Amino acid sequence: MNKEDIFSLMNNNPAFYLATVEDNQPRVRGMLLFKADDTGIVFHTGTMKDVYKQIMKNPRAELCFNDFKMGIQLRVSGELELVDDNNLKDEISEHPTRQFLKPWKESGELKDFYNTFAVFRLRNGIANAWTIERNFAPKDEIRL
């Protein structure tokens, strides 16, 4: 796989698992990708969530995407950065795939939307693709 294949796999399979660490204990949860391209892998959460606190304390993380039709599992490791960009937050909250955010933003359900809506980006990650055919082959790390 090359970088374009990897970004395509992520964007076509936007549900992924995010692994963080809290007090030496791994924590894994499902997340929803906003986009993946040469600028990075972008997703969001709320500042009131445990995942936000875990990332802020230790930004090292691993993301795991699956394309079940193709039989590919993709893991990407790296360091997450908090993106403080209200234009990007608006872009995300107004995107057709994020209609669930609109009421939170417009009704004030999330107090101070721009400070409680956290966007993270993983840049320069290292990706490893797994298939059953390559189960015992050495890892083929791809820099993003």
Image: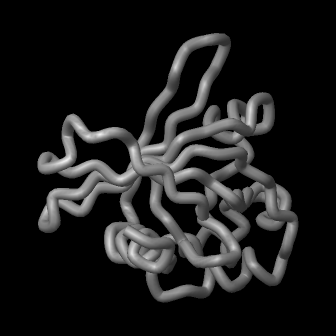
- Of the pair 8 and 23, the residue shown nearer to us: 8
* Residue 103: quarter of image: bottom right
Q: Looking at the image, which residue sits at the far top?
A: 24
**129 horizontally vs 99: left or right:** left
Quarter occupied by the C terminus: bottom right
**10 horizontally vs 57: left or right:** left
The residue that appears at 69% across and 31% down in the rendered structure is 54
- Of the pair 131 and 36, the residue shown nearer to us: 131
Quarter occupied by the N terminus: bottom left
Q: Image height check: is 123 above or below 100?
A: above
**3 horizontally vs 14: left or right:** right
The residue that appears at 69% across and 59% down in the rendered structure is 124
Q: Position of residue 2 (x, y in %)?
A: 44, 72
**38 horizontally vs 115: left or right:** left
Q: Looking at the image, which residue sits at the far front?
A: 138
The residue that appears at 77% across and 65% down in the rendered structure is 113
Q: How is the image coloured?
A: one colour
* Residue 17: quarter of image: top left
Q: Image height check: is 50 above or below 108?
A: above
Q: Position of residue 18 (x, y in %)?
A: 49, 43
Q: Position of residue 75 (x, y in %)?
A: 43, 48
Q: Position of residue 81 (x, y in %)?
A: 78, 53
Q: Image height check: is 104 above or below 129?
A: below
